[in-house]
Amino acid sequence: MASIFAPIPKFVFTVFEPISLIAGAVAPFISPSWFIAEQIPMTKASNVTDNSRMVALQLGNVYALLAMVGIAVLYTTTEAKVVRNYVIALWIADIGHVAATYYVLGYETFMDIANWNAMTWGNVGATAFLFLTRTLYLMGVLGADRKPALPQIGKKAQ
């Protein structure tokens, strides 16, 4: 693994986040109706339309894409600029993800943490955790990036 992260961000961004994204990708493919019904806690399940199913499956595909891009970038590059810009893009997306969830849930449901279901914990709780971890990483609080080992120049292959 080529990751330049210090241990905590390395675990969060190269292990926890890809696993979370894969879980988010698999759920709508296993049961689109369940996935759709769970988006808003404490609501009565309604008929799921083909439009809703399509959006859920497309969202699952986007989660899979994010997992693959994250693995591709973070497991292969040793360029700090690339890693940092990738983390910044995700940091911005975290804000949009929580804002969209808040917009649909409304203030009362959003603030009623005791009644959140697993999906809301994923949409808000896990995203807030990732946002906080990204913020601390970008501020340098979680340790400096590791310098990649430079190839030795002038050594002949035997």
Image (spheres, helix red, strand yellow):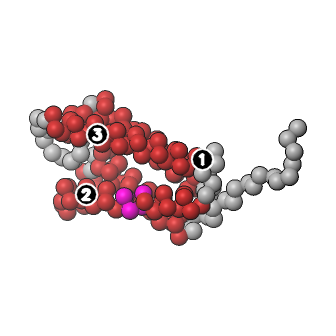
- Name the residue nearer the viewer: 24 or 79: 79
Q: CA distance from mark 1 to mark 2?
A: 32 Å
Amino acid type at mark 2:
Ala
Q: Residue at label 2?
A: 100
Between disc 3 and disc 1, whose residue precedes?
3
Task: Answer with the quarter of the image where residue 4 lies.
Answer: bottom right
- Judge depth for marks 1 and 2 and give the one in front: 1
Kindly indicate whether the residue at mark 2 contacts the one at mark 1 (C-beta within 8 angstroms): no
Q: CA distance from mark 3 to mark 1?
A: 27 Å
Q: Secondary structure at mark 3?
A: helix
Residue 57 % position (x, y): 28, 36
**Residues shaded magenta:** 90-94
Residue 137 % position (x, y): 53, 63
* Residue at the (38%, 62%) spot, across then down: 92
How many residues crowd mark 3 within 10 Å: few (<14), some (14–19), many (20+)?
some
Q: Residue at label 1?
A: 76
Q: Is residue 59 left or right of residue 76?
A: left
* Dominant secondary structure of the residues highlighted in magenta in the image: helix
- Name the residue nearer the viewer: 118 or 146: 146
Q: Is residue 155 left or right of residue 98?
A: right
* Residue at the (53%, 70%) spot, across then down: 139
Q: Residue at label 3?
A: 58
Between disc 2 and disc 3, whose residue precedes?
3
- Judge depth for marks 2 and 3 and give the one in front: 3
